[in-house]
Amino acid sequence: MDEKDIKKIVREGYAKVAKQDSSCCGPSASCCDSADAPKDIGKMIGYSEKDLKNLPQGADMGLGCGNPVALASLKEGEVVVDLGSGGGIDCFLASEKVGESGNVIGVDMTPEMIDKARENAEKGGYKNVEFRLGEIDHLPIADNSVDVIISNCVINLAPDKKDVFAEAFRVLKPGGRVMVSDIVLEKELPDFIKQSENALVGCVAGAILKSDYLDAIKAAGFEKVDIHKETTYPVEFITEGPSTKEALKDLGITAEQAKEYVGSIVSIEVSAVKPK
């Protein structure tokens, strides 16, 4: 798949997610079995009950793999950009941290997600949050204007991770921070998984080796690149997620056969700093 094909597949996949209020990356329960499933997923990946309590309905879609806002240690008055903001959950949590004097900008390339996030912001009365349509490897953000970049299980979907981190570096102020939760690999997946459209939308096929991911951050110019947390991706996220279920069906393999690859799929939380 070339870059245009990948972006088209991801955009269409997440447009569908936005319309049906369900998760591509989470367990199947987040699609249909329970209205509380996204909240359950949120707790599983690091959000507290307090984090989730006051969010607008529909903001938590069960799409993440960590809690980058907690990792970011945000301060009042800071400007934050969320790469791939989805329904807005991390933007709204960041909004409380930066206060009225701060600003949070969510960027997403899917118009349906932007519409959903703006509706959620209006429902929640968030005055210091805005959402912009754009691609995370071509950010609609000025140079040297941002204090913190956050992202939650999105950069793995981008065709070229180096371009994403180069853009993050460009828009950050000197001394600015990157705080990312994402999916990476301990070993390469077989080609038949990497070429699956459903596995791509399901946050698996687009993931790269952990060493390559960290190298992409360093190549952009970042320093102090640290992994704060590393967790093997839950088996049920791979074998029970709606998109990956479709991928397994397309590929003609069983959930049991797929489990042999699960151990190589890892969720990490990473931070880095742009030199002053």
Image (tube, rainbow, N blue to C red):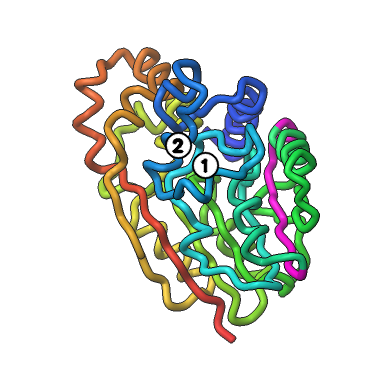
Mark number displayed over residue 157 = 1
Q: Which image quadrant for residue 177?
A: bottom right
Separation of disc 1 and disc 2 at Cα? 6 Å
Q: Residue at x 27, y 16 (%)?
A: 253
Can residue 162 be seen here? yes
Q: Residue at x 58, y 68 (%)?
A: 74
Residue segment shown in magenta: 101-112
Q: Residue at x 37, y 54 (%)?
A: 268
- Is 188 drawn above or below residue 167 in the view shown? above
- Of labels 1 and 2, earlier in sequence is 1
Mark 1 is on which residue type?
Leu
Q: Is residue 106 magenta?
A: yes
Residue 40 image position (x, y, % from top left): 42, 34
Residue 248 image position (x, y, % from top left): 35, 18
Mark 2 nearby-residue class (10 Å; few <14, some 14–19, many ≥20):
many
Q: Which image quadrant for residue 89?
A: top right
Relative to 188, 43 lies left or right:
right
